[in-house]
Image (spheres, rainbow, N blue to C red):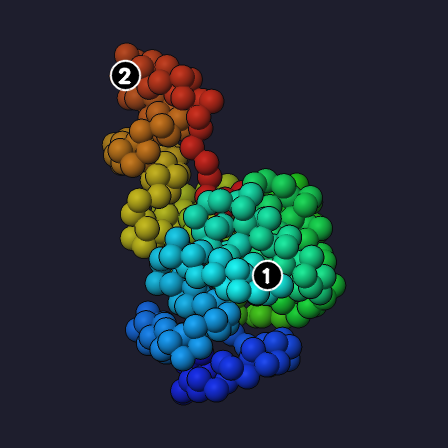
C-alpha cells in the first residue's frame, strides 16, 4: 500500500503494526500510493489477510483507507466502524472515519470522531489537525486555531498545520498572524504552492500588491496548473491598473479551469477598463451562464450596457443584480 515509498508490501509488517501500534508514529507510516491501481492492489492484500485473520482491526482500517482513495467513502465508513467494533480503543480508526465523514460533509460526525481519537490519545496531533479542518469548514475559526495550535505543540514540523492555521487567522482578518504562519509553513516545506498562494492573498489584504504578485508567481512556478494563483495574480494586477497583464492571467486561469465564473467576471472588468465593451459583455455573459446567481456579473454587465447606450438592458441587469445581492456568489480564495 505504501508503494510511494517502498517497493513491496509485507503482510507480516501489517501484523507487526498490531503488535506494536507505536511503530506507526515512530516510522511516520504514510498511507499514500502512486495511483489508484496501487490502492486496488493493497485492498486485495488486506482482504486476503482478513480471510486469514477475520478480526484483524488494522486490515479493516487499511481497507477503509483504500476505499477512501478510491472515492468509496460510504463503504470506507463501514470498514472503519467494523474496526472500532472489534477494538473500541482503536484511535486510528476514529480518526480515519472522521476524515471519511468530513468528505461526505458530515462535519459534526467528523468532529465527534476526531474528538474520540483525541480522548483516546491526547497527543494525537493528526486528530487535532483534522478536527481543525472540520471546524474551519464550519467557520469556527477560533476553534480551528485552537486545534491547529495544539497539533503544532505536539508536532511542530507539520507544514500544512501552519498553512491551515494561517487560513483561519486570515478569515479572522489577522493578516499579520496569517503571514507569520505561512512563513513557517514555507520554511518547513518550500515547495508547497498553495502556501505561497495563501500568503499572497494575505499580502493583498494588507495592500502589499507587489509582494502578493511575487507570491502568486512563485506558486505558479511550483505548479504551472494552479488556476487560482493565476486568478489571484490577475486580481492584484487589476488593482495596480495593469489591465493587459490581468487579462493574460485570467485567460490562463480560464484555460486551466473554464468553469470558474468569477474569473470571467473579473476579466470582463479588466476589458471594461480598456474600453473593450464587447469583450467585457462577452465575459459577463459567460460568468452568468456558469453561475446564473452571479450578482456582480449582472451589475457589471449593466454598467457596460449603460456606457454603450442600452439603458433598458442596463436597468434590467441592475435590477436582477439587486435581487440577487443577498445570494452573492462566493469568491474562491481571492483578496
Label drawn at residue 313: 2
Residue 183 higher or lower than 102, as above or below: below
Q: Residues within 10 Å of mark 1 (few under 14, many from 20)?
A: few
Residue 175 visible in the picture: no
Query: Which type of secondary structure does the marked residue at label 1 adopt?
Result: loop
Q: Residue at x 59, y 61 (%)?
A: 88
Q: Residue at x 37, y 14 (%)?
A: 319
Q: Residue at x 56, y 59 (%)?
A: 94
User: How much space separates mark 2 and mark 1, taking CA atoms?
Assistant: 64 Å
Residue 90 position within the rendered picture, expressed as x and y whole percent measured from the top left: 59, 65
Q: Badge 1 is on which residue?
A: 88
Residue 164 position within the rendered picture, expressed as x and y whole percent measured from the top left: 60, 55
Q: On the picture, is 27 further left or further right than 51?
A: right
- Of residues 267 and 23, the one nearer the viewer is 23
Query: Which type of secondary structure does the marked residue at label 2 adopt?
Result: helix
Residue 140 position within the rendered picture, expressed as x and y whole percent measured from the top left: 63, 41
Amino acid at each position: 500500500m505504501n508503494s510511494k515509498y517502498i517497493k513491496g508490501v509485507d503482510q507480516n509488517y501489517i501484523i507487526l503494526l498490531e503488535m506494536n501500534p507505536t511503530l506507526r508514529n515512530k516510522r511516520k507510516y504514510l498511507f499514500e500510493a502512486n495511483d489508484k491501481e496501487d490502492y486496488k492492489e493493497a485492498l486485495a492484500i488486506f482482504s486476503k489477510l482478513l480471510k486469514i485473520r477475520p478480526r484483524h482491526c488494522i486490515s479493516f482500517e487499511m481497507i477503509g483507507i483504500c476505499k477512501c482513495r478510491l472515492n468509496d467513502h460510504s463503504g470506507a465508513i463501514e470498514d472503519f466502524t467494523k474496526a472500532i467494533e472489534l477494538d473500541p480503543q482503536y484511535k486510528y480508526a476514529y480518526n480515519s472515519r472522521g476524515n471519511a465523514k468530513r468528505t461526505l460533509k458530515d462535519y459534526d460526525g467528523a468532529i465527534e470522531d476526531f474528538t474520540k481519537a483525541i480522548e483516546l490519545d491526547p497527543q494525537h496531533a493528526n486528530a487535532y489537525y483534522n478536527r481543525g479542518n472540520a471546524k474551519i469548514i464550519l467557520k469556527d475559526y477560533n476553534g480551528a486555531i485552537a486545534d491547529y495550535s495544539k497539533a503544532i505543540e505536539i508536532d511542530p514540523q507539520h507544514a500544512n498545520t501552519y498553512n491551515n492555521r494561517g487560513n483561519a487567522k486570515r478569515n479572522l482578518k489577522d493578516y499579520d498572524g496569517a503571514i507569520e504562519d505561512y512563513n513557517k509553513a514555507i520554511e518547513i516545506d518550500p515547495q508547497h504552492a498553495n502556501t505561497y498562494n495563501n500568503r499572497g492573498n494575505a499580502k493583498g489584504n494588507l495592500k502589499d500588491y507587489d509582494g502578493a504578485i511575487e507570491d502568486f508567481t512563485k506558486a505558479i512556478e511550483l505548479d504551472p496548473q494552479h488556476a487560482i494563483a493565476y486568478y489571484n495574480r490577475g486580481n492584484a494586477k487589476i488593482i495596480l491598473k495593469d489591465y493587459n497583464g490581468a487579462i493574460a492571467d485570467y485567460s490562463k486561469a480560464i484555460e486551466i479551469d473554464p468553469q470558474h465564473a468569477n474569473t470571467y467576471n473579473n476579466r470582463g472588468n479588466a476589458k471594461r477598463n480598456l474600453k473593450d465593451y464587447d469583450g467585457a459583455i462577452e465575459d459577463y455573459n459567460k460568468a452568468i451562464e456558469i453561475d446564473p446567481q452571479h450578482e456582480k456579473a449582472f451589475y457589471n454587465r449593466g454598467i457596460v450596457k449603460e456606457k454603450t447606450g442600452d439603458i433598458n438592458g442596463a436597468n434590467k441587469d441592475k435590477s436582477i443584480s439587486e435581487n440577487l445581492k443577498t445570494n452573492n456568489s462566493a469568491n474562491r480564495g481571492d483578496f
